Every structure is written in structure tokens, then in C-alpha cells.
Image (cartoon, rainbow, N blue to C red):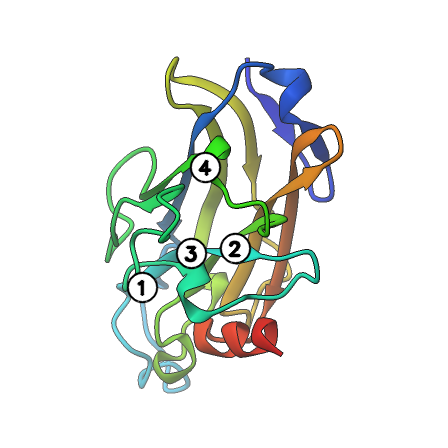
């Protein structure tokens, strides 16, 4: 049975799955129910379809990006090391299970990368007046790619995310005792580009 993580919890991958190398990070979400009637205050909102995009920030020991190429997302599906492969963009979040998947081969991650930060952001969230209050059942799960065993699962709390357009979901961090996974669940009003600029400075 997968370990159910709560915000701030960490697990050791070496302890939970000693032979782990190829992993899959699955991210999923559903649309919250739209009110039956629209008031004059929300009539100008965009359609109920919300496009969420997952991304991986490959950070060095200073928790910074070496280059824009160290962000793996819908416009840059593969890290140049060959260690990380994004399986593509899901525009609607419809269907059961994972909406987007990211494959990681731990042994191929370059030594200069100390952590992988997994995020989900609402595409053009500010312009479309959409935020994470329009989303429910958001989760991230860690799976052993070779055995299909689910190792850890983190479901995002659905409270207190009004006006938040980007979510730091989880992190894989390299330690002296192997890789650790941490559940973050931290929201912000940043766009993906704004977050990239923050980690480039």
C-alpha cells in the first residue's frame, strides 16, 4: 500500500524502495462544480475549462536553475540529460487517473542537479480569472516504473487556495542517504514564467 503523505512529510526512497531507479510521477485533478447560475459578478469569467500544466524544475545546490532548459514542461518535454521525460499536456483534466505523467531515471540525473521540484500551474490563470478554487482532487503520486508499484501518494488540500494560480506539489531531493520525496502543497499567484525568473536569480 502506498504511503499517504501529508503536507510537509518526507520519505526516503532508499528505505521504501531500495532498488528504485526509474520512477513515474503522476499528477491529476478534476474541475470543481460550476454554480448552476452565473451572477453579474462572474459573468465575465472565461469558460469552465481550465488548462493545468505540470512542470519539473531541475535545481542546483543553490536551489537555482542553471538555464531555462532545466525546466521540463509542455514546451520542453525532455531534459537534455535524458533523465526526465514529460509525457505531454492534458488540456482539460478529463478522465480517471493521472492527467499528466513525468518519467524520471534517477541514475541519469546529472550530479549538478540537487533537487527536482514538481509544480502545477493554471495556464493563463490570471488573464482568464481562474485559480485553484476551481480545482478539486489534485494529487501527485510516485510509482516504481518497472513494477508499477505505487510508493507514495499526496492529495492536495482543497482549502485556502483562492487566487492561487500555481502550486508547488512535491520535491525529490538528493541527500547523503539517497533521494527523498517531500510533499509541499504550497500555492502562489505566480505564472510559470514568473517562477522561472525567480529561480534564475
Kindly identify which numbered label has been placed on residue 50. Answer: 1
Determine the image quadrant of residue 159. Answer: bottom right
Q: Position of residue 122 (x, y in %)?
A: 40, 66
Q: Position of residue 9 (x, y in %)?
A: 73, 37
- What residue is rendered at 67% in x and 61% in y? 63
Looking at the rendered structure, the secondary structure element under dot 3 is strand
Q: Which residue is mark 3?
A: 55
C-alpha separation, residue under disc 4 versus residue under disc 2: 13 Å
Kindly identify which numbered label has been placed on residue 171. Answer: none
C-alpha separation, residue under disc 3 versus residue under disc 1: 16 Å
C-alpha separation, residue under disc 3 versus residue under disc 2: 10 Å
* Discs 3/1, front: 3
Q: Pointers 1 and 2 in contact (CB under 8 A)? A: no
- Camera-side residue: 53 or 177? 177
**Crowd rating for badge 2 (residues with CA inside 10 Å; few <14, some 14–19, many 20+):** many
Q: Which residue is mark 2?
A: 58
- Camera-side residue: 38 or 94? 94
Kindly identify which numbered label has been placed on residue 108. Answer: 4
* Discs 4/3, front: 4
Amino acid at each position: 500500500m502506498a504511503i499517504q503523505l501529508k503536507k510537509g512529510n518526507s520519505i526516503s526512497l532508499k528505505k521504501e524502495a531500495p532498488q528504485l531507479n526509474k520512477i513515474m510521477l503522476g499528477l491529476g485533478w478534476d474541475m470543481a462544480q460550476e454554480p448552476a447560475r452565473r451572477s453579474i459578478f462572474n459573468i465575465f469569467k472565461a469558460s469552465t475549462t481550465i488548462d493545468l500544466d505540470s512542470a519539473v524544475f531541475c535545481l542546483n545546490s543553490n536551489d537555482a536553475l542553471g538555464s531555462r532548459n532545466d525546466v521540463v514542461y509542455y514546451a520542453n518535454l525532455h531534459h537534455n540529460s535524458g533523465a526526465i521525460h514529460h509525457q505531454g499536456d492534458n488540456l482539460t483534466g478529463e478522465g480517471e487517473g493521472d492527467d499528466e505523467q513525468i518519467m524520471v531515471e534517477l541514475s541519469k540525473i546529472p550530479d549538478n542537479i540537487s533537487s527536482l521540484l514538481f509544480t502545477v500551474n493554471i495556464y493563463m490563470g490570471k488573464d482568464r480569472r481562474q485559480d485553484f478554487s476551481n480545482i478539486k482532487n489534485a494529487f501527485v503520486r510516485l510509482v516504481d516504473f518497472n513494477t508499477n508499484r505505487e510508493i507514495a501518494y499526496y492529495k492536495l488540500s482543497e482549502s485556502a487556495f483562492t487566487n492561487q494560480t500555481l502550486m508547488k506539489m512535491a520535491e525529490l531531493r538528493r541527500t547523503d542517504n539517497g533521494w527523498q520525496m517531500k510533499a509541499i502543497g504550497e500555492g502562489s499567484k505566480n505564472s510559470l514564467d514568473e517562477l522561472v525568473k525567480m529561480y534564475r536569480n
